[in-house]
Amino acid sequence: MATHVITGAGAGIGEAVARRLHARGDDLLLIARDAGRGKELTAAFPGSRALVGDLADPDKLSWAFSHQTLPDRVDSLIHVAGVVDLGAVGELTTKSWRNQLNVNLIAPAELTRHFLPQLRAAQGHVIFVNSGSGLSANAEWAAYAASKHGLKALADSLRQEEHAAGVRVTSVYPGRTASAMQEKVHRHEGKEYDPARYIDPESVATTLITALDLPRDAEINDVTVRPGR
């Protein structure tokens, strides 16, 4: 039975991935920002465990984890959680920049550092759910895109560093996906939100799990998922 550590399991792509892995009987360790959120997640996925750590404050993750029990081995670490706050470079505050960099880049790096010994023990898999913005940046997307470009760099470096240890690393770059985040983006853009026009989170989950289940003779390094409509 495989053990998966997942961020962002409460909604969207993360929820879809967690539900699929839970349904096949795998063990889930779900990252929650506080104990209350942890109880909600474990109630949604009976038999799962919550690991409390606020991704918005990555400096405190090490302290938080030192007071909790971590598994001896981890088959996959799946980074899905993310935040977006759009705005022109001339208008974005340092608070906005810092929050997006903390949640989207620094926290994944810190989580990966903590779980690398367990991933090496299992010859596991690190999966980063990135974004089309991790490959190109548009107007008013500077801070978010910078965090996602950084996430690509993190994944690419990690892949080279851990190849000899048998740890696989995959970056998934979804286009616009039907989610609460996408609804927020549409409000910023002043556009009507129609989830039917965008990728279903289940489709991204299918892509992710395909990479996860690929036999050991192959590895998906990068995969882009675009809306089919």
Image: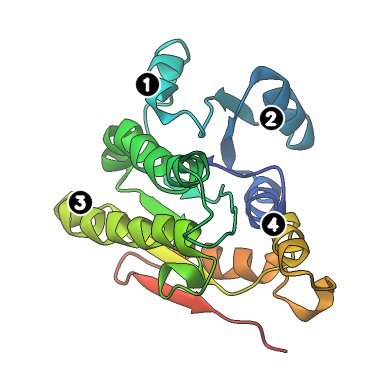
N-terminal of the two: label 3 or label 4?
3
As displayed, is residue 110 above or below residue 220?
A: above
Q: Are marks 3 and 1 in contact (CB under 8 Å)?
A: no
Per the model, the C-alpha gap separating discs 1 and 2 is 25 Å
Which of the pair 188/168 is nearer the observer?
188
Q: Establish if 170 lies above or below 54.
A: below
SS class, disc 2 = loop
Q: Quadrant of the C terminus?
A: bottom right
Where is residue 144 shown, x and y percent of the image?
A: 49, 58
Colour convention: rainbow
Relative to 191, is 131 on the left or the right?
left
Distance Cα–Cα, label 3 vs label 1: 21 Å
Name the residue tied to disc 2.
47
Query: Of tags 2 and 4, which is closer to the observer?
Result: 4
Mark 3 vs mark 4, CA separation in Å: 32 Å
Q: Position of residue 49 (x, y in %)?
A: 61, 27
Label 3 crowd (10 A; few <14 / some 14-19 / many >=20): some
Q: Earlier in the sequence, mark 1 or mark 4?
A: 1
Q: Which residue is mark 4?
A: 181
Q: Residue at x 57, y 59 (%)?
A: 87
Labelled disc at residue 162: 3
Disc 3 marks which amino acid? Answer: Glu
Q: Residue furthest top?
A: 67
Mark 1 lies on a secondary structure that is helix
From the viewer's perspective, is the residue at label 1 or at label 2 nearer?
Answer: 1
